[in-house]
């Protein structure tokens, strides 16, 4: 398959200049999807006709001398847990069978305002619960870099779509690493914004205090541009941050001279980090130092408890968020003689094993008599992690470490033991618990020739410095044969 | 049966009923608690709904500022401490709950530690908390016994889902059904005075659950039962009395009271088990992650305090002082309940006899239009009575006409032909009636006192109501003494 040429910003520049019609851009991407989607299965639904119509409208505006926006004509792969008006939104679950949201998510409106075009709804682990996209009710997505391997997850569909050139940009959601980890495994950039920077209105809730929507892209500049387009206050989300969003693209090329970079010991030494992955991360750190950054090791002790705390908070919130899928109002219903039995049968038929596991874990963790020992204690650990990270950010502008412990793994390798799968998120979870921004940047390959991701983390609202450091990592990355 | 009843009566003096009330008041906001849908009763089912109040996937709640203002206003009127609070999710499955959790407040409610003074007895009832939460939809179970378990099918109207509620929880400080009714009436008056709620029990915008237990004074409280489905003050009183009796009978017969939730059946006049403590749900409360903590701060609280209206208790005191009666006089309480106290005060200030003004407010002005009455006209009416120009019966008639037309009392009295009879005319009428009923008169003179009513009635009939009842009574008594 030959992906359409250019970065998202290249495409937008050409469309805005009237040099390349958006309709042609969409057609090229539809052609790429037609050629490769059968093997990759990145999408739950390809919106070819809708995308073509949107492209025609953009071209008309360009012809009329208007500016359709900074992402004019760029096809975007939208994770299928983000609501689209009148278009099925499945969360890759049977429970939402037949449901069409009567409204667009805020990010969908902002994409349209920026001139971007939604080209399809992408596959995910059911309700975003997973790290391999194997938990989808509609079958797994394959990694474009090696179709025998998983793309990561849960935003595996969006990451694969961007990596395969099916879309110029992707949107995912990141609750414990669900944007960054698949980005690392597919060799693309994936970024989780500060909690509250991007509206969650219209994102089907998984773990509300952790969920953030963020960009996937082939370059750091593209990710920054997409972030810029979707970030900002939304009165429909009470947890949305009111402060204006500074321009994060302008300073990308300024480099890292004098930037204080902390290498987090606990993340580099976490359980199961492959040596070849760590070797690439060390090279990236050396490159930053070579570019003038002041690099030092830093200990953030509480992050080692992140995984444990996360797997209490996340299922607890999920168990409550997923209670609404009961067959009464929308989606799947399996009829039964009584309401209670209808709930049971509907939910049993509609949810997959991982979703059931989290609902049970979360229900237990919130139960009377266990709340303090589980949920209460997890929240205290969360406070400790924030405290330790805040302490680190007094000395450092950004922190770095690996994104995922390994490169992409084969299908079925981690499905037998949920805990093995959960360990994929050990490096990404701390930023979700703290609400801080973090980004994964591809940096070379492991011994198996598959991409490695380097993670750059920043304090709350520190996106500008984070993107700047990410751009420096990107600039130093070894060039693969199909990197843009 | 009679033995049990006798037993109850014999020991009832030793038992004391302990009552705490949970009152749910719908806040009178323009829109719902977490979305922009109208907060309106009586519309076509499922017309005031949106993704948020239907709990559709991806929707998020945004707190209604007006609901917070009204909650604080009620809280301050109950002299609560208003403080930083957080919202929590109360998790349970029910078809009229769109999200299968209710957004409520749990361990950190907005209003805590207040008090309410009962109007007649003057006793103080502690307010434990008054917290904000969302209402559910309304289910109609069709077929079977009208309950979800045996219905053929159920209909749900989500217009009410997400309507803001204030749950006001009293301390177990009430000691009788009468106390409980007085508490709810007073709370209702405060809700109305503050504009927090329209507090209509018949429309369900004010709902009451009662926690009832019994004990012997000086001993710890007994096991309590929570009584639901109390849709009127009458039900509340009856249910408490029934439940206290039931618990006393249980204990007297050597059994124990089980902690449970009970349902009041108005037709049968009894409570029945809804669920026992063991069957009680574990609501798995946890902080609502979609909302941020609510911290109104001193400035906002100060503004609420400054804008608080004069509350019923203060209004009762003002009226009682002006009328020279005790603040717990029934007429004073009624005047304030009906919001006729300012009318009464103005009429008294305009020279109206306080006792007669209060009598009219208490007995003759139970209509909404009474509020528009001109106080000077009411004072003028009362003065005509004082001067014996009108009888009490005539005054009541004239007052009704004044309320209906706004006309001047003198003009109405004239048009109706109400002119006080002179003493000679009245005496003649009385003598005529006595002469026409010799048998009854003889019995009356011999001491059959209840025949007074007969003679007064006959005189009123003969004079077509123009006679003053008091004057007639006095004359009849005088003639009897002389007989």
Image (cartoon, coloured by chain):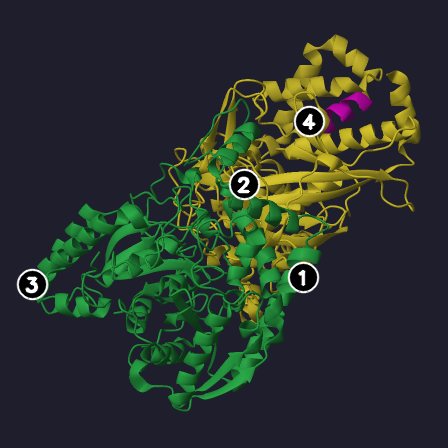
Q: Helix or strand or loop: what does disc 4 sit on?
A: helix
Query: What residue is rendered at 23% in x and 68% in y?
Result: A7
Asked if both marks, 4 and 2, belong to the same chain, the answer given is yes
Real-space CA distance between mark 4 and mark 3, rounded to the nearest whole angstrom: 98 Å
**Image vertical order of residue B7 relative to residue B124, above or below:** above
Do residues under tags 4 and 3 come within 8 Å of each other at their CB atoms?
A: no
- Label 4, label 2: how far apart the Cα atoms are: 49 Å
Q: State the CA–CA distance, disc 3 to disc 2.
A: 56 Å
Crowding at mark 3 (Cα within 10 Å: few <14, some 14-19, many 20+) = few
Q: Give the chain coloured yellow.
A: B
Q: Quick check: is B36 in the magenta stretch?
A: no
Verify whether residue B472 appears in magenta. Answer: yes
The numbered mark 2 sits on a residue in which chain?
B
Q: Earlier in the sequence, mark 4 or mark 2?
A: 2
Q: Mark 1 vs mark 3: give the one in front.
A: 1
Q: State which region is magenta.
A: B471-481
Corner quadrant of residue B232:
top right
Tell me the mark number nearer the camera, choosing from 1 and 2: 1
Quadrant into which the C terminus of chain A falls: bottom left
Task: Say what secondary structure mark 3 lies in.
Answer: loop
Describe the element under mark 1 as helix, strand or loop.
Answer: helix
The circle drawn on residue A64 is 3
Q: Please give the letter of the chain rendered in green.
A: A
Which element type, helix, strand or loop, lies under badge 2? loop
Q: Are marks 1 and 4 on the same chain?
A: no
Q: Which residue is mark 2?
A: B205
Mark 4 — residue?
A: B472
Of A333 and B126, which appears nearest the observer? Answer: A333
Mark 1 nearby-residue class (10 Å; few <14, some 14–19, many ≥20):
some
Magenta-highlighted stretch: main secondary structure? Answer: helix
């Amino acid at each position: 398959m030959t992906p359409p040429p250019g970065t998202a910003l290249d495409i937008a520049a050409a469309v805005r200049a009237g040099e390349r019609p958006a309709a042609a851009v969409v057609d090229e991407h539809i052609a790429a999807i037609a050629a490769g989607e059968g093997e990759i299965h990145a999408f739950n639904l390809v919106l070819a006709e809708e995308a073509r119509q949107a492209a025609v409208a953009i071209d008309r505006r360009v012809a009329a001398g208007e500016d359709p926006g900074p992402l004019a004509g760029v096809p975007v792969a939208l994770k299928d847990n983000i609501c689209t008006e009148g278009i099925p939104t499945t969360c890759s679950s049977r429970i939402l069978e037949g449901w069409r949201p009567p409204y667009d998510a805020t990010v969908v409106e902002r994409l349209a305002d920026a001139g971007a075009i939604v080209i399809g709804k992408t596959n995910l682990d059911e309700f975003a619960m997973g790290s391999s996209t194997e938990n989808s009710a509609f079958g797994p997505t394959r990694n474009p870099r090696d179709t025998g391997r998983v793309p990561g997850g849960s935003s595996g569909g969006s990451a694969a779509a961007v990596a395969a050139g099916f879309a110029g940009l992707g949107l995912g959601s990141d609750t414990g690493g669900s944007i960054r980890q698949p980005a690392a495994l597919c060799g693309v950039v994936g970024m989780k914004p500060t909690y509250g920077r991007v509206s969650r209105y219209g994102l089907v809730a998984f773990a509300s205090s952790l969920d953030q929507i963020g960009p996937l892209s082939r370059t750091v500049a593209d990710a920054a541009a997409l972030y810029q387009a979707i970030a900002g206050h939304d009165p429909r989300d009470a947890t949305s941050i009111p402060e204006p969003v500074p321009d994060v693209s302008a300073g990308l090329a300024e480099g890292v001279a004098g930037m204080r970079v902390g290498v987090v010991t606990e993340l580099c030494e976490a359980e199961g980090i492959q040596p070849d992955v760590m070797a690439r991360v060390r090279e990236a750190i050396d490159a930053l130092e070579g570019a003038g950054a002041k690099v030092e090791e830093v200990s953030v002790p509480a992050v080692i408890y992140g995984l444990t705390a996360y797997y209490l908070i996340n299922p607890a919130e999920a168990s409550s968020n997923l209670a609404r899928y009961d067959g009464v109002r929308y989606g799947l219903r399996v009829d039964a003689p009584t309401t209670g039995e209808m709930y049971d049968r509907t939910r049993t038929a509609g949810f997959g094993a991982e979703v059931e596991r989290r609902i049970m874990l979360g229900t237990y963790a919130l139960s009377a008599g266990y709340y303090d020992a589980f949920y209460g204690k997890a929240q205290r650990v969360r406070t400790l992690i924030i405290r330790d990270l805040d302490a680190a950010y007094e000395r450092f502008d950004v922190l770095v470490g690996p994104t995922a412990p390994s490169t992409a793994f084969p299908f079925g390798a981690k499905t037998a033991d949920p805990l093995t799968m959960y360990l994929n998120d050990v490096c990404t979870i701390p930023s979700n618990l703290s609400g801080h921004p973090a980004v994964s940047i591809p940096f070379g390959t492991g011994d198996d020739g598959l991409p490695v991701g380097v993670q750059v983390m920043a304090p709350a609202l520190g996106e500008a410095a984070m993107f700047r450091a990410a751009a420096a990592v990107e600039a130093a990355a070894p060039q693969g044969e199909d990197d843009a | 049966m009679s033995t049990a009843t006798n037993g109850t009566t014999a020991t009832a003096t030793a038992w004391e009923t302990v009552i705490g009330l949970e009152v749910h008041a719908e806040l009178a906001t323009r829109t719902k608690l977490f979305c922009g849908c109208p907060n309106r009763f009586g519309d076509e089912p499922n017309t005031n709904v949106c993704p948020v109040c239907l709990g559709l996937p991806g929707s998020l709640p945004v707190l209604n500022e007006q609901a917070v203002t009204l909650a604080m206003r009620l809280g301050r009127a109950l002299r609560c401490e208003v403080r930083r609070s957080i919202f929590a999710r109360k998790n349970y499955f029910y078809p009229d709950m769109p999200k299968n959790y209710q957004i409520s407040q749990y361990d950190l409610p907005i209003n805590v530690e207040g008090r309410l003074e009962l109007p007649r007895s003057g006793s103080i009832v502690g307010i434990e908390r008054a917290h904000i939460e969302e209402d559910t939809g309304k289910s109609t179970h069709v077929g079977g016994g009208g309950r979800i378990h045996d219905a053929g099918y159920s209909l749900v109207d989500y217009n009410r889902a997400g309507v803001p509620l204030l749950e006001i929880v009293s301390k177990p400080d009430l000691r009788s059904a009468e106390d409980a009714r007085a508490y709810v009436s007073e709370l209702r008056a405060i809700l109305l005075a503050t504009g927090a709620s329209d507090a209509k029990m018949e429309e369900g915008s004010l709902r009451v659950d009662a926690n009832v237990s019994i004990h012997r004074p000086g001993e710890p409280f007994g096991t309590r039962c929570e009584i639901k489905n109390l849709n009127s003050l009458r039900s509340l009183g009856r249910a408490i009395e029934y439940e206290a009796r039931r618990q006393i009978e249980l204990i007297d017969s050597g059994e124990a009271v089980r902690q449970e939730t009970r349902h009041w059946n108005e037709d049968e006049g009894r409570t029945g088990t809804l669920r026992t403590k063991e069957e009680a749900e574990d609501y798995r409360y946890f902080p609502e992650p979609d909302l941020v903590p609510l911290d109104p701060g001193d400035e906002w609280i100060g503004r609420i305090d400054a804008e608080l209206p004069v509350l019923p208790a203060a209004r009762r005191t003002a009226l009682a002082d002006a009328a020279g009666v005790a603040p717990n006089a029934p007429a004073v309480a009624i005047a304030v309940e009906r919001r006729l106290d300012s009318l009464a005060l103005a009429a008294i200030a305009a020279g109206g006899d306080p006792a007669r003004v209060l009598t009219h407010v208490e007995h003759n002005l139970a209509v909404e239009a009474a509020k528009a009455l001109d106080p000077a006209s009411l004072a003028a009416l009362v003065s005509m009575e004082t001067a014996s120009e009108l009888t009490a019966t005539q005054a009541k008639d004239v007052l009704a006409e004044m309320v209906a037309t706004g006309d001047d009392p003198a003009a109405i009295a004239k048009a109706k032909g109400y002119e006080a009879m002179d003493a000679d005319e009245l005496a003649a009428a009385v003598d005529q009636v006595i002469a026409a009923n010799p048998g009854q008169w003889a019995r009356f003179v011999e001491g059959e006192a209840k025949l007074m009513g007969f003679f007064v009635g006959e005189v009123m009939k003969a004079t077509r109501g123009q006679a003053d009842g008091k004057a007639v009574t006095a004359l009849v008594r005088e003639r009897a003494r002389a007989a």
